Image (cartoon, rainbow, N blue to C red):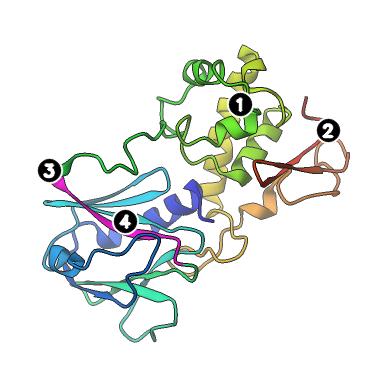
Amino acid sequence: MPELPEVETTRRGIADIVTGARIEDVVIRNRSLRWPVPEALPELLRGQRVQKLERRAKYLLFTFEHGTLIVHLGMSGSLRVVTAARPVEKHDHIDLLLEDGRILRYKDPRRFGCMLWQPAAAGPHKLLAELGPEPLSDAFDAGYLSEQLSRRGSAVKLAIMDQHVVVGVGNIYASEALFRSAIHPERAANSLKKQEIVALVAAIKATLADAIAAGGTTLRDYVDSTGNPGYFLLQTYAYGRTDEACRQCGTPISEIRQGQRATFFCRQCQK
């Protein structure tokens, strides 16, 4: 599913197009996403200008004068800029028609994403209210992570995937960051030493930055705003490389299950 790098890649791809643009109309073909798309959305957005486009965790936030459009791509969603000449396909559920004639089209085969409205006067949406800090921000540092991990006896991989601890470190990027910091994914979170936490914070930031530079990761459905896949999978050290030789020591990469998700690591390099 799209994680932070994929959502950030999407944001960067459409930000210049939508920021300052007026919404001429909204076409809803299917309201049945993870939560129903508000019936009043066309009336709320028609004639309004997008003031800014931000990302919070895996949510895209389209800010208008009177509120915020909250978009989540779910497991298979994408936002693409198209023209009216492009035929509508089966899973193209929502179109935002821009004043220059282009269309911001939301496609979601599995319909696990969402498009919700939050009035400006209502304060933070409940989906965003309890999220941890952004991993690429200054707020996410070794001091903060040390305090968070000290209270958790769960496996460190599960801890850094907890959106209350830090947002956006999905399954792929957790495995990769733990490899880069030489930490075994089954280690108890509260067993990490200070230097290991420093290394882990640096590895999380570097892994996510590299993934964004590569356009994210495409496993199945994800494409960016121009229809291109992400290429980070070509440079992973651990994720998806079961039984392949470790790029550092040659030991076969191992795979286990943690929290119903696959975890990949090197038994030699990660302790």
- Residue 112 counted in the magenta span: yes
Does 88 sit left or right of 270 as displayed?
Answer: left
Among the 4 quarters of the image, the one containing residue 56: top left
Q: Which residue is mark 4?
A: 15
As helix, strand or loop, the secondary structure at mark 4 comes to helix
Does 23 sit left or right of 83 as displayed?
Answer: left
Label 3 neighbourhood size at 10 Å, few (<14), some (14-19), many (20+)?
few
Say whether disc 2 or disc 3 marks the residue closer to the N-terminus: 3
Image quadrant occupied by the C terminus: top right
* Image mark for residue 267: 2
Say whether disc 1 or disc 2 marks the residue closer to the N-terminus: 1
Q: Marks 2/3: CA distance?
A: 52 Å
* Image mark for residue 121: 3
Label 2 neighbourhood size at 10 Å, few (<14), some (14-19), many (20+)?
some
Q: Marks 4/3: CA distance?
A: 24 Å
Q: Marks 2/4: CA distance?
A: 42 Å
